[in-house]
Image: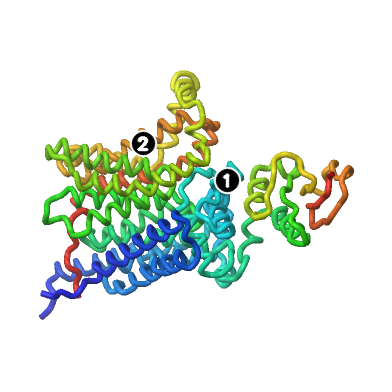
Amino acid sequence: MSFLPTAADRGRRAALVMLVSLLLCYGLAAVGVMGWPMLALFAVFLAGAALSLLGLRELRVAIPVLVVLALVGISLGSPGDAWDPRSIWLFHAKRIYLDGTLYAQLDDYAPWSHNDYPALVPLLMAAAAGLLGHWNELLPKAVAPLLLLPALLLIAPGLRSRWWVALLVLLLLRVGREMLVNGYMDTLVALYALTALVLAMRLRGTDDSRRPGDIVALALVVAVLSLLKNEGAVLAAVVVGSVVLEGALRERRLCWRVLLAFVVALLPLLAWKTSVAAAHISNDLAGSDLQSQLLVRLTTDGGSAMILKRLLLDEWMLAPLLVLAVLWRRVLQRPLAAVALLAALGYIAVLFLVYLSTPQDLAWHLQTSAVRVRQPVVLLLFLAATVAVWRADPAAPATPDPR
Amino acid sequence: MTPSPSTASSARWRLASVILLTILILVSLALTARKSDFQMSLLGQAFVADAGFEVSVPKEVVDARALVMRQPHDLSPLSLGQGLKDDELIRQRMWEALYPQRFSDADTPHRILRATDPVLNACQLIDRRGDVVLADCR
């Protein structure tokens, strides 16, 4: 028996180094410490990514690492012309870089740029520019695909076979497409939600399935998920709620570890939202007349049908839903499948309500965002379908990698 | 020792699966690169100051920024003429791409206008580049 770390262990350690350093980087900026300490922590984040290269001999680590490297390369060689990344994330990043504070956007200049959105990724983008010594339109954008790496490194080594890792990466590439490289946050939100669910299920499991540090890993992933964008916190709540509810119904016990990790992980977001409230910045959705918009769309203009059509009528949604409908008995028998389906349905319900109450023109809002925001649902449904069909258990402990 | 037929068949199946998955991943990466307008020339400039600006924003924004950068003094706040303000894409790109130069939705003394904007007749032309002018409309 060898006590040397396996390649999968190295990948997991690299992921934890990346997550801890980026949250410390955010923590320093949040208390006003910018400059070299923040840049040093960002350099540690990059070193963590480099550390993952040590695990390349194991395919379950090599596949995500090489694909993320390719995506970072594509991002570095692509124009930064996508609407949301330019108007929100890269703009906020440039403001942090030039103004030298995490709270630059809280003066509410250019309110269309959603100044209430969390500033974790903009901070990292600004740090990339800071490390380079100047701003450009290419390097900061590449931070987004690099952030896929810690989540993939936490989830991939736990998969029973390298085939599942390849299929997960393929699914991510097909669902995320160009949004993986042009600075959108939506695929990151989807992947971190999936990772949170898998880690929470591992933490909910028996002592054998749990690994030391799983509770810390879950807290780190949920903290990052909640700071990616506003939807991240909602999704984290839906995922954790599904894990806890299903656990309470099936096992008649409360998963206090999962709840503890969730509560602690939301503290940075709470601090950010307190600053946003103190700056009197409101969210476009929360600041509108939600109730009347919702009632009008429910009763008169066929809004419900339009929303359901846009959210559900797509092969990436229908294919796993069909499998799950056929294999509903197995879904009920297997906790991971049941929880993933519960979380997917819960988040669809949230999206449905958000679209019903949107202050924007509904058709326009759906056309410009439905494909992006349903990505977490697609990943969760595919996880549920995969577990139902093949009994692949991503929450199981990793098998030793062949040497 | 010769492998049994079932072992050989399993190995062939595995190899075919590896090749298929590798091809699918590579094709997906290539499609991602194509849809995001990946260019090797841009990749070569990834660490150069201001790289990628001209290919990332509309030409009016490139011209406006060049006009503003040629001015010796900060002209903030600027405002946009109707032909530019009405186009939401150009409006947002002007505000974010020219930052730290600040804009206002209300009319200000210094304005960025289209060269054909009739308002220009009542203003003093400061500079022009392409279809965009910087004007003093006090």
B125 sits to left or right of A294:
right
Q: Can you say whether B44 is above or below A108 in the image?
A: below
Q: Can you say whether A265 is above or below A142 in the image?
A: above
Classify 10 Å Cα crowding around label 2: few (below 14), some (14-19), many (20 and above): some
Classify 10 Å Cα crowding around label 1: few (below 14), some (14-19), many (20 and above): few
Q: Nearer the viewer, residue A308 or A325?
A: A308
As helix, strand or loop, the secondary structure at mark 2 comes to: helix
Q: Chain of mark 1?
A: A
Residue A298 coordinates in the image, percent (x, y): 44, 22
A341 sits to left or right of A41:
left
Tag shown at residue A107: 1
As helix, strand or loop, the secondary structure at mark 1 comes to: helix
A167 sits to left or right of A107:
left
Q: Nearer the viewer, residue A129 or A10?
A: A129
**Where, quadrant-wise, is the N terminus of chain B in this rendering?**
bottom left
Q: Which amino acid lies under the numbered mark 1 shown in the image of this protein?
A: Asp
A393 sits to left or right of A47:
left
Which of the two discs, 1 and 2, labels the residue nearer the N terminus?
1
Residue A110 coordinates in the image, percent (x, y): 61, 44
Tag shown at residue A348: 2
CA separation in Å, label 1 and label 2: 34 Å
Q: Residue at x 80, y 52 (%)?
A: B134
